[in-house]
Image (cartoon, rainbow, N blue to C red):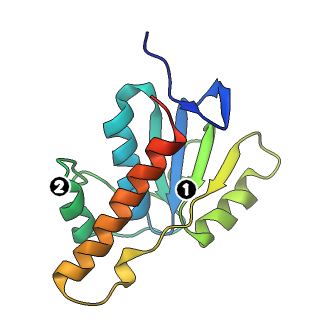
């Protein structure tokens, strides 16, 4: 029997939709979205957005491709581009996104959870050092997603 992923914190309520929000919807939130889609397929609806619009990052493309996942078709979108905010869970990945989502969902029946994540675009160093930071982000998001949602 295929069931929607559940939230271990509330095992009676399956999570059927999740929104990831970061600052520019160019690295963190699209990576998280793609990881959820890869792990859970159609068992969970997943989307991502940002508080500002940005271009998909080449390093994010590279580290996701290492896992056989593609961000090639990702188009950055703003929170305002979404038709609605009717998600079971909204996960914010930056302080700016968290404050914005708390303001937007005030009075709404939606859980907003903050996962502090580093912005790997701030890493300086060699190409391999920068890629290492992006891999750390990807792997950290995957571990957090797997821990949060059970199959």
The numbered dot on residue 132 is none
In the image: residue 1, left or right of residue 58:
right
Residue situated in front as seen by the camera: 13 or 42: 13
Give coordinates of residue 102: x percent, y percent.
Answer: 72, 58
Which residue is at a point 61% across and 42% down the rendered structure image? 89
Considering the numbered disc 2 on the image, is that residue within a helix, a strand or a loop?
A: helix
In the image: residue 19, left or right of residue 151:
right
In the image: residue 14, left or right of residue 40:
right
Which residue is at a point 54% across and 35% down the rendered structure image? 17
The answer to whether one can see residue 16 in this image is: yes
Give coordinates of residue 90: x percent, y percent.
Answer: 60, 48
Question: Image quarter for residue 64?
Answer: bottom left
Give coordinates of residue 24: x percent, y percent.
Answer: 45, 68
66 w.r.t. 43: above or below: below
Question: Image quarter for residue 47?
Answer: top left
- Residue that badge 2 annotates: 65
In the image: residue 125, left or right of residue 149:
left
Is the residue marked by circle 1 packed among few (<14), some (14-19), or many (20+) residues within 10 Å?
A: many
Give coordinates of residue 69: x percent, y percent.
Answer: 22, 48
Which residue is at a point 51% across and 37% down the rendered structure image? 149
- Residue that badge 1 annotates: 79
């Amino acid at each position: 029997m295929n069931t929607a992923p559940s939230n271990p914190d509330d095992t009676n309520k399956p999570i059927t939709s999740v929104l990831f929000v970061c600052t520019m919807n160019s690295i963190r939130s699209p990576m998280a979205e793609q990881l959820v889609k890869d792990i859970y397929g159609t068992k969970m609806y997943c989307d991502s957005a940002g508080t500002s619009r940005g271009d998909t990052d080449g390093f994010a493309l590279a580290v996701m491709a290492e896992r056989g996942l593609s961000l090639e078709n990702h188009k950055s979108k703003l929170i305002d581009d979404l038709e609605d905010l009717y998600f079971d869970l909204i996960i914010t990945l930056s302080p700016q996104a968290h404050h914005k989502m708390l303001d937007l969902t005030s009075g709404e029946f939606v859980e907003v959870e903050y996962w502090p994540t580093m912005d790997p675009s701030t890493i300086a160093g060699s190409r391999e050092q920068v890629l290492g930071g992006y891999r750390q982000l990807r792997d950290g998001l995957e571990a957090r997603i797997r821990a949060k949602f059970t199959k």
